[in-house]
Image (cartoon, rainbow, N blue to C red):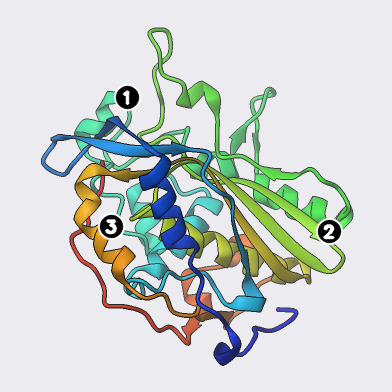
C-alpha cells in the first residue's frame, strides 16, 4: 500500500458518528417503518433524508472504526460480507464461507418464500448478483468490479468509475412485479476517482440504520478502498459517505443516549497483511487491526428485520 498512517499519537478524535446521530435526532421525522423487531412487532424510525456528508482521510487520521463502543468483535464479518458480495455470493451458506454469519434472521423460509426464493437465498436482485453477474440485454452477465478495475488501469482520468448494486426489475415491487430480493440493497453505489496517485471513493447509501449498520459500512467500504488502492498501485486517500435515508429505530433510544454520553478516541490503524492482484481474491483475514482504543462493547441493541 502506498503511503502510511499518521502515527497514532498525532491523530485527533473524530466526532462525525455522534454528530450524525444528533443530526437525526434534531432534524429527523418519526414515522412508521416497514421493518419489525425480532418478535415481529412493528417499530417506528426517526428518519432524516440527506444527512450531512461524512469524510474520512484514511491515512491522515486513522481508519474509521467507531470508538464510542467496541466493535472489534464483528468487524471481520463486515469486511467478509462485502468481499463475499464482490465474489457473487447470494446465499447464507456462501456468506458464511467468507466469515459473515448475521444474515440468518433475514433469510428465513418464510421471508424467502414471499419472493419465490429458496430458504437462504437473497435472490437475483441482491448485492452479489449485481456486483458479479449483472444481467445484460444479450442474456449474458457483467462483472462490475472486474471491469471497473480494468477501466481504472486503462483510463484513470475518467469520471465514470461507477458501480451499482441496484437491478430494478428485481427490486421494484408493485401489483405487476414481484420483488426478487429478500432485502433490497441498502449500500453499494460506488464512485471511484483517481486524482494524481491517490484513489478516493464515494459510497452513496439508500438506507442506513446508523446504530447497527453504519459502523459496519464504514469499516467494510474503507477496507475496500485499501484493497482497491493496492490492486491499482495507488495511495488510498479519502472515503466519502453520503446517506439518503439515515435513521434510528425508536426502540434504540436508550442505547443512543449511552453512545452520546461516551468519549470519542482517535481512530485505529488497519493494514493489509496479505496483498493480491485481483480485488476478488481479498478476504477478511488479509487485514490487521491495531491501535484500537474504545469504550466497552454495547450488547443488545435492537435491529429491524
Residue 71: image quadrant is: bottom left
Q: Which residue is mark 3?
A: 256
Q: Which residue is mark 1?
A: 116
Is 53 in front, or is 199? Answer: 53
Q: Earlier in the sequence, mark 3 or mark 1?
A: 1
Query: Label 2 to label 3, Cα distance in Å?
Result: 43 Å
Label 1 sits on a secondary structure element that is: loop
Is 296 in front, or is 37? Answer: 296
Q: Quadrant of the N terminus?
A: bottom right
Query: Label 3 to label 1, Cα distance in Å?
Result: 37 Å
- The residue sitting at 48% across, 25% down in the picture is 170
Label 3 sits on a secondary structure element that is: helix
Left or right: residue 273 compared with residue 289: right
- The residue sitting at 84% across, 61% down in the picture is 195
10 Å crowding of disc 1: few (<14), some (14-19), many (20+): some
Is 93 in front, or is 247? Answer: 247
CB-based contact (under 8 Å), mark 2 and mark 3? no
Label 2 sits on a secondary structure element that is: helix
Is 244 in front, or is 158? Answer: 244
- The residue sitting at 61% across, 90% down in the picture is 7
Q: Which residue is mark 2?
A: 153
Q: Residue furthest left?
A: 39
Query: Label 1 to label 2, Cα distance in Å?
Result: 40 Å
- The residue sitting at 81% across, 55% down in the picture is 152
Left or right: residue 53 compared with residue 3: left
Q: Quadrant of the C terminus?
A: top left
Residue 221, position as x, y percentages in the image: 55, 59
Amino acid at each position: 500500500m502506498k503511503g502510511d498512517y499518521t502515527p497514532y499519537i498525532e491523530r485527533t478524535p473524530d466526532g462525525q458518528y455522534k454528530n450524525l446521530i444528533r443530526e437525526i435526532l434534531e432534524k429527523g421525522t418519526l414515522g412508521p417503518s416497514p421493518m419489525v423487531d425480532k418478535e415481529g412487532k412493528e417499530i417506528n424510525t426517526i428518519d432524516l433524508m440527506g444527512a450531512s456528508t461524512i469524510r474520512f482521510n484514511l491515512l491522515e487520521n486513522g481508519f474509521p472504526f467507531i470508538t464510542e463502543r467496541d466493535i472489534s468483535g464483528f468487524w471481520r464479518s463486515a469486511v467478509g460480507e462485502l468481499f463475499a458480495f464482490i465474489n457473487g455470493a447470494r446465499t447464507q451458506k456462501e456468506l458464511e464461507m467468507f466469515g459473515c454469519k448475521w444474515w440468518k434472521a433475514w433469510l428465513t423460509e418464510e421471508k424467502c418464500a414471499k419472493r419465490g426464493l429458496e430458504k437462504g437465498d437473497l435472490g437475483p436482485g441482491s448485492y452479489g448478483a449485481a456486483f458479479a453477474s449483472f444481467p445484460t440485454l444479450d442474456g449474458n452477465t457483467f462483472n462490475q468490479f472486474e471491469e471497473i478495475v480494468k477501466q481504472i488501469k486503462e483510463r484513470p482520468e475518467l469520471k465514470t468509475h461507477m458501480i451499482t448494486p441496484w437491478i430494478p426489475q428485481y427490486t421494484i415491487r408493485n401489483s405487476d412485479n414481484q420483488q426478487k430480493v429478500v432485502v433490497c440493497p441498502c449500500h453499494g453505489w460506488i464512485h471511484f476517482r483517481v486524482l494524481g496517485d491517490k484513489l478516493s471513493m464515494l459510497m452513496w447509501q439508500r438506507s442506513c440504520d446508523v446504530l447497527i449498520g453504519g459502523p459496519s459500512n464504514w469499516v467494510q467500504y474503507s477496507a475496500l478502498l485499501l484493497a482497491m488502492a493496492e490492486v491499482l498501485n495507488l495511495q488510498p486517500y479519502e472515503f466519502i459517505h453520503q446517506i439518503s435515508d439515515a435513521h434510528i429505530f425508536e426502540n434504540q433510544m436508550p442505547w443512543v443516549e449511552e453512545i452520546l454520553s461516551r468519549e470519542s478516541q482517535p481512530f485505529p490503524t488497519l493494514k493489509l497483511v496479505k496483498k493480491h492482484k485481483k480485488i476478488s481474491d481479498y478476504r477478511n483475514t488479509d487485514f490487521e487491526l491495531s491501535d484500537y482504543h474504545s469504550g466497552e462493547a454495547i450488547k443488545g441493541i435492537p435491529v429491524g428485520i
